[in-house]
Image (cartoon, grey):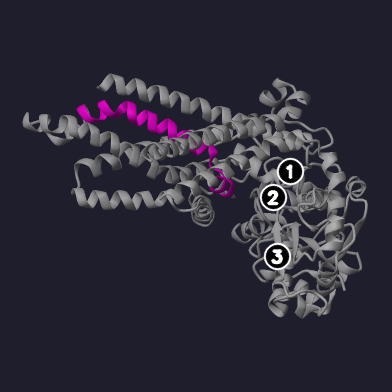
Amino acid sequence: MKDRREFIFRFIVVTGAAVSSVLVLLVFFYILGESLIFFRTVSFPEFLFGSTWSPLSPKPEYSFLPMILATMYISLLATAIASPLSAGCALFLTFNSHKKISRFILSCIDMIAGIPSVIFGFIGLVVLVKFLERHLHMTAGESVLAGSILLSVMLFPYMVTGCAEAFENGKAKYYAASQSLGVSKWYTMRKIILPCASNAIFVNMLLAFSRAIGETMAVMMVTGNSPIFPKLLGRAETIPSLIALEMGTAEYKSIHYSSLYAAGLILIITVFFIQLAAHRLNSAGRRNTL
Amino acid sequence: MKKFNILSIILILMLVLAGCAPAEQPSQANPQESTQQPDSNNEQETDKFVPQILFNGSSTLAPVMASISTNFIEGFVTWDKVDASFPEENISIYVSAGGSGQGVKSVIDKTSDFGMIARTVKDSEKEKLTELKEFKVGVDALTLGVNPQNPVLTVKDNLTTDEIVKIFSGEFKTWKDLDSSLPDKEIIVITRDIGGGAHEVFQSKIMGDVQVKADAIQAPSMGALVTKIMENEYAIGYASFGVVNQNKGKVATLKVDGVEATKENILNGSYIIQRPLIALFSGELTAPQQVFMDYVMSPEGMEVVESMGFVPAK
């Protein structure tokens, strides 16, 4: 009886693992298969180093460069805005507030992660874009800046949770010792906790960055979706927005259709390498601090 | 406990099988499928009563169809109340939006019964749909919409085709380029996605071979486009006649070549930026499908089309 139960349990665990990994591979190969037509017809320098995206004009041009740059620009800026804020917030919650209060605040911050991204997009459209129009004297507030600010708010909960965990580990290890030596709290934070958590923070930033790259709806609503080279106060279109906007209407099995899959493939590969780097750094960091 | 385990194994097995399906689909040649399916469909039509009807396609027509079908379902509930010869089964009509292109695709792939499109059927599509039936439900026009605060309204209430082309192609960069008395503010051009039905109509009726400028804002839906016009006083975009009517007073429209977008001008064809709203069908309609389409084309159905701001076909 016990044997059988164990066997069933093992079966469930193994199938679960197999199914999820096979699914990931299937998705990858399906996208690769659909984008093959594109890679066969459009040359490598054209789609990576061209400057115009106009798949439906009489002389179609397919260049992902403006979109790739815009995706990187917006995601980097969003991570840059969110990182110091969330590290500071996590430090405060770990060291300066009462445990009960910080647990309550943390769960509130976690709730931000549960808000659907279209809601963020809508708030961004009617509040943030309007704000930029009024205060920066822009004729249209849709811009890289608007997208980055909005995205940084969405990244905030993930980064706070991640950083708080790292700081909590550091606190458990060194705080009692540093207090018994009479070192001030702020000095401990600055000179001991932050350096020892720096690796974890960086890994956190990488993960947040890869999450930012894939965000679609909210970014699509505030960046204006113009396939041009991104400027801080200019409009831009990210790869996920490009796919979301054009996939519904692209002619089935056409080069345009296939090119959108190719854009998706580029996105997947980018995220894959970032995740790989984060994983490597994380395990290296674990070994060093222990 | 044991039962639960077995259940979960079955569930997982189903998942595994479901996971296999997408891998097989692309390798199976599509033409084969399409030759096989109509046969089996015909058998179904004669043998079995199908209580549900599926619609898919244009996001402009979808809310209209959804509203008509809601009235139909609430009015009759079961099919036998519609016609005594039908069995007593609940009426179910599903309407999903995904763009005109998807509407045609779904009829070709047989994933839905009716396709909804907000443009004319292309010749290349007619070749794939052999027994095509078109139901013209109504007409939508694209109006040149601006914010009521836009200073252009104090100078002119009309744009010529040439001016529109220059505005949308980026030749006129600021409102001052259009008229020297207007402020030196950027013209914010808003379009729908370039592959969509609305843009296709605008491109062929107004722009011709000229491309819309690359830094135009692409709105993900007609609603978003009109919202942007209502929010930004220097914006201009091709707003759907229906959606503009739903937001009366918040969007101002300009005449095109001296013709105003009114019901009469749209119906008699003198307002040129217009497009038909069509429900497509391929093959022979089943009895319940016929009854529902009759209802759509009836005065009650047409009333809904009009109440949503479009021009009814009848």
Amino acid at circle 2? Val
> Which dot marks residue B63?
3
- Vertical placement of A160 versus B163: above or below? above
Q: Are marks 2 and 1 in contact (CB under 8 Å)?
A: yes
Magenta span of residues: A192-221
Q: In which image quadrant can residue B292 be found?
A: bottom right
From the top left corner, tell me how far across and down residue B291 is, in percent.
83, 72
Distance from label 3 to label 1 (Cα)? 33 Å
Discs 2 and 1 share one subunit: yes
Q: Chain of mark 1?
A: B
Residue in the foreground of this view, choosing between B138 and A252: A252
Mark 2, residue position? B189
User: Do the residues indicated by labels 3 and 2 lie within the same chain of the protein?
Assistant: yes
According to the picture, the residue beneath numbered tag 1 turns out to be B170
Q: How far apart are the alpha carbons under marks 2 and 1?
A: 9 Å
Residue at point 70% right, 21% down?
A44
Q: Position of residue A241 (x, y in %)?
A: 61, 42
